[in-house]
Amino acid sequence: MLALVEALVVLAIVLITASVAYALIRAGGKPQVAAADSTTRWVAMHYSARNVTRVVVRRVRAEVGAVLDEQIIVEIPDSDSDFDAKFIEAMAQARARAALFESESD
C-alpha cells in the first residue's frame, strides 16, 4: 500500500513538472504575467454616482474589459454651476494621464 502511495506522489510530481514546462514552452519561455500585461491599457472615463460625476483613468484588460486599477482625477457635483467647464478640463487631464501611463508601459 505504501509503495502505491509513493508511486502516485512521484507520478503527480512528474505531471506537474511536465505541465509547467509545457506552459513555459508555449509562452516562449516568458512568464504568463508578461503576456497578460501586454493586453492591458489605460483609458480615460467618467461615470455618475450619487449626484457626483467622477472622471477617472482606468487600467483595463482589453479582451474582457476587466478593471485592474482606477485613479480618480476629479469628482464634480452634478449640480455645480460650472459643471461643463470643469468636466471638459477634467477629461483633458484624464486623457493626458492615460497617455502618460500608456507611454510608460511600453
Image (tube, grey):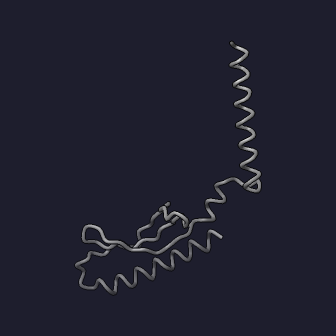
Image quadrant for the C terminus? Answer: bottom right
Query: In the image as oriented, which residue stretches furthest toward the top?
Result: 1
Q: Is residue 58 left or right of residue 22?
A: left
Q: Residue at x 42, y 71 (%)?
A: 56
Residue in the image at 38% along x and 85% along y: 88
Rendered position, 32 above or below 52: above
Q: Is 76 placed left or right of 72 in the picture?
A: left
Residue ID at (70%, 24%): 8
Q: Position of residue 43 (x, y in %)?
A: 50, 73
Closer-to-camera residue (3/102): 3
Q: Position of residue 35 (x, y in %)?
A: 66, 60
Q: Residue at x 73, y 15 (%)?
A: 3
Asked if 49 appears above or below 86 in the picture, the reply is: above
**Residue 59 spot, x, y in % from top left:** 51, 66
Which quadrant of the figure contains the N terminus? top right
Total count of labels:
0
Residue 6, image quadrant: top right
